[in-house]
Image (cartoon, grey):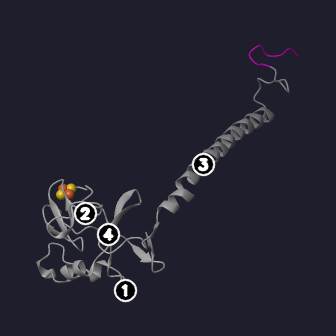
Amino acid sequence: MSQDAGTEAVVPGDANTTTGEGVRRRDFINIAAVSAAGVGGVVTLLPLISQMAPSADVLAESSTEIDVSAIQPGQAIKAVFRKQPVFVRNLTPKEIGEAEAVDVSTLRDPQTLKERTKEGHENWLITMGVCTHLGCVPLGAGEGEVKGEFGGYFCPCHGSVYDTAARIRKGPAPKNLQVPEYAFTSDTVVKIG
Ligand code: FES
């Protein structure tokens, strides 16, 4: 009997056919491609995640240790803490007396010297060297620098004046110089941060 002219013969193994085996092979190829993309995603994500974790350098920078033994009463130094200036000042008994004599209720940002220093180390005034107005570095920590009329720090940018407890006394700055987190790890070493 002759074959109908409108139909085609199905030949097993022909690549162009739609046999069950052919469909399975294509599915496998698609799955393999998707899996490869998934692996690629994980491989590219891992370096990103490890870049987001703080490096040892950054962790080390997050605190600063300062040996204050060479800073004499009446002297100050400028150090760097998290890429910003920090002032470490050894107050004289006179400067402590001046700070304590102020009626705190008259201050723009009321704080006692005691609240701004550590117990047993009241002569050590440690503040950020960043004016709370617009962020200039005030004068007064360096040798021979102008300290302003209240004997602390003076910001020449717009004329803010800080007292011997680094509290704002005059000018546009709204707040006292910020006291960072710190602790004495010995009588002569301060760890800031
Ligand atoms: Fe210090 Fe303006 S930035 S007074």
Quadrant of res 116: bottom left
In three-dimensional space, the C-alpha distance between marks 3 and 1, rounded to whole angstroms, equals 48 Å
Which comes sooner in the sequence, label 2 or label 3? 3
Q: Is residue 67 magenta?
A: no
Look at mark 4 in the image and give the residue it sits on. 75
| Residue at left offset 20%, top offset 61% | 146
Mark drawn on residue 47: 3
Q: Amino acid at mark 4?
A: Gln
Q: Amino acid at mark 3?
A: Pro
**Label 2's element?**
loop
In front here: 8 or 190? 190
Mark drawn on residue 140: 2
Quadrant of res 5: top right
Callout 1 environment at 10 Å: few (<14), some (14 to 19), or many (20+)? few
| Residue at left offset 24%, top offset 74% | 165
Above or below 147: residue 23: above
Above or below 57: residue 92: below
Which comes sooner in the sequence, label 1 or label 4? 4
